[in-house]
Image: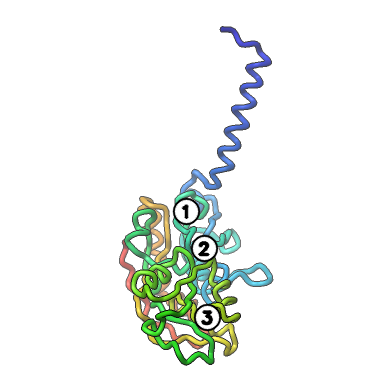
Amino acid sequence: MRINRSLRLGIGAIALTLAATTAACGGGSDKSALDNAKDGKLTVGIKFDQPGLGLRNKDGSYSGFDVEVAKYVAGKLGVKPENITFKESPSGQRETLIENGQVDYIVATYSINDARKQKVDFAGPYYVAGQSLLVKADNSSINGPDDLKGKKVCSVKGSTPAQNIEKNYPATQLQTNDTYSLCLEGLQAGSYDAVTTDDIILAGYAAQSAGTFKVVGKPFTTENYGIGLKKGDKELRDKVNDAIEAMIADGSWKKAFDSTVGVSGYQAPTPPTVNRY
């Protein structure tokens, strides 16, 4: 069967439109993180609402320990700070952002665990934290996880702390939100009795609250923070591990901690040993 020229052109135009639409819907990049680094640019996932760790400031700048770690690693990959695009990476979206190529790596209080390692790779750890509780300053009824029975406790969807409460403290009324800032608003309003996540995150919120909130009890888990990477990219993982080790060895790790989280009075712990997962 013969197809006239105008029909062929029409079919070609439709094909091009579909191809463009498909590419746009993907939202990611076919390039590897190291390819992007060679081009002098990287997209890095961080949290936007964690004081002292990953915070988007009112002037559009970014600050926090995770931000400083991200910048240091980027520098070791040959990318200047001004050529980093920071992308918000909520806990429940981190694996998807990496798998879809929407970020080159993620530094966002990202606890390493076996379930996540099925989908992404990790470098690190670059920090070891522990889960704790944040309550109103005048709350004397909650001093640890054993006091949570029947209490309304907020955490973030998809986070390790939320999963831990659900699994190990089933009598707790767990509530989840997309961000910790929403949990804090609920705690302030009296909708929740406590907010739970890692102690280092809560310390930042307590410091920012100017006495409204306090961290209670001792940490009741061990959370190894890793840098999330695309699964199977061993070359990138090795380079990022090298960067973390260099940051610890040359004093930049301690300097970054003291200038961010340390401002709240939280003392820097002994740096972790990179496990090269």
Q: Residue furthest top?
A: 1
For badge 2, the amino acid type reads Pro
Specify whether residue 20 is in view. Answer: yes
Element assignment for label 3: helix
For badge 3, the amino acid type reads Gly
- From what the image shows, is residue 138 above or below residue 155? below
Q: How is the image coloured?
A: rainbow
- Residue 255 in percent (x, y) is at 48, 79
- From what the image shows, is residue 84 above or below residue 57? above
Identify residue for label 2: 90
In whole angstroms, how far apart are the C-alphas of marks 2 and 3? 17 Å
Identify residue for label 3: 204
Specify whether residue 245 is in view. Answer: no
Image quadrant containing the N terminus: top right
**Residue 226, picture quadrant:** bottom left
Question: Which residue is located at x 31 percent, y 66 percent?
Answer: 275
Lateral position of residue 17 relative to residue 89, left or right: right
Image quadrant containing the C terminus: bottom left
Which of the two discs, 2 and 1, labels the residue nearer the N terminus?
2
- Residue 10 in percent (x, y) is at 66, 21
Q: Observer-nearest residue: 149 or 252?
A: 149
- Residue 35 in percent (x, y) is at 48, 48
Whether label 2 touches label 1, CB < 8 Å: no
For badge 1, the amino acid type reads Thr
Element assignment for label 2: loop
- Residue 186 in percent (x, y) is at 57, 76
Q: Observer-nearest residue: 56 or 181?
A: 181
Identify residue for label 1: 96
In whole angstroms, how far apart are the C-alphas of marks 3 and 1? 27 Å
Question: Which residue is located at x 47 percent, y 52 percent?
Answer: 33
Lateral position of residue 71 relative to residue 273, left or right: right
